């Protein structure tokens, strides 16, 4: 009887230990996936003049009646990437758009760098075919460019990226805009991380 009791106790302890180790490992994988995931481009940028290195808005369509949106080329460190960047101090709201080829139902990654000066009224938004992917109103000032990455699924053979910009008292800076096909491994790693977080939340509930 004592032997059976000890054996059962050890089995319960082993099961708990295995569960604890599994939870710890899964938590580590989830944290690593969510903190280290950066979509690496498997293909070239689908946008034309995404970094504004043409020193103008070639490839883009700009609508800013106030005339306070443009491109400057001071070089680094003012330019986040390369020598040029776009800026906007639109009094109302300026729009910057570009269409590019896509394959329906395929996942793409939009990325860009944006710098806010902390003035208000100010507004910045990014959308694909009218679907908002990122937007802020009166954002706090940032000491440097803020990296933004969003995934989206194309719905047609041509997709349109649009930025809305307004910063009447100052300027918003935009650079390194890219749309790429992310590596399948990157998407899988992100999915694993999200699944791990969801599993841990269910266990705690």
Image (tube, helix red, strand yellow):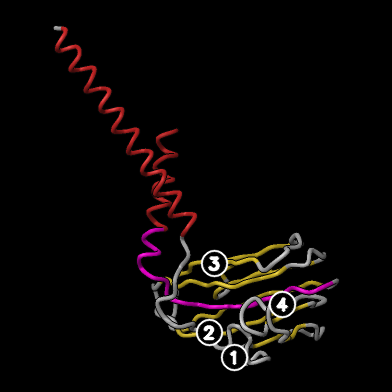
Q: Which residues are magenta?
A: 170-189
The residue under the point 30% across, 29% down is 17
Number of the front mark, 2 or 4: 4
- Whether residue 113 appears in magenta in the rendering, the answer is no
Q: Name the disc covering residue 149, or none.
A: 3
Q: Name the disc covering residue 78, or none.
A: 4
Q: Secondary structure at mark 3?
A: strand
Tell which circle, 2 or 3, labels the residue nearer the N-terminal end. 2
Q: How busy is the neighbourhood of tag 1: few (under 14 within 10 Å), some, or many (20 plus)?
A: some
User: Is disc 1 in contact with disc 2, using a CB cutoff of under 8 Å?
Assistant: yes
As rendered, which of 6 and 63 lies closer to the eye? 6
User: Is disc 1 in contact with disc 3, using a CB cutoff of under 8 Å?
Assistant: no
Number of the front mark, 4 or 1: 4
Instruction: Measure the alpha-carbon separation of dots 1 and 3.
Output: 21 Å
Expressed as whole percent of the image width and height from the top left, the position of residue 192 reads: 37, 53
Tell which circle, 4 or 1, labels the residue nearer the N-terminal end. 1
As rendered, which of 29 and 99 lies closer to the eye? 29
Residue receiving disc 1: 59
Instruction: Measure the alpha-carbon separation of dots 2 and 3.
Output: 15 Å
Residue reaching furthest to the top: 1
């Amino acid at each position: 009887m004592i032997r059976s009791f000890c054996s059962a106790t050890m089995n319960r302890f082993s099961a708990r230990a295995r569960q604890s180790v599994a939870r710890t490992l899964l938590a580590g994988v989830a944290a690593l996936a969510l903190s280290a995931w950066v979509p690496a481009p498997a293909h070239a940028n689908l946008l034309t003049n995404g970094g504004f290195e043409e020193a103008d808005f070639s490839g883009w369509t700009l609508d800013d009646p106030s005339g306070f949106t443009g491109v400057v080329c001071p070089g680094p460190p003012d330019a986040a990437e390369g020598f040029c960047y776009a800026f906007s101090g639109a009094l109302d709201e300026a729009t910057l758009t570009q269409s590019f080829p896509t394959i329906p139902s395929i996942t793409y990654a939009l990325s860009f760098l944006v710098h806010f000066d902390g003035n208000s009224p100010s507004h910045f938004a990014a959308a694909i075919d009218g679907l908002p992917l990122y937007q802020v109103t009166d954002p706090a000032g940032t000491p440097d460019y803020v990296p933004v990455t969003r995934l989206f699924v194309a719905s047609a053979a041509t997709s349109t990226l649009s930025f809305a910009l307004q910063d009447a008292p100052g300027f918003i800076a935009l650079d390194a805009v890219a749309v790429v096909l992310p590596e399948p491994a990157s998407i899988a790693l992100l999915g694993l991380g999200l699944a791990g977080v969801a599993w841990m939340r269910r266990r705690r509930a």
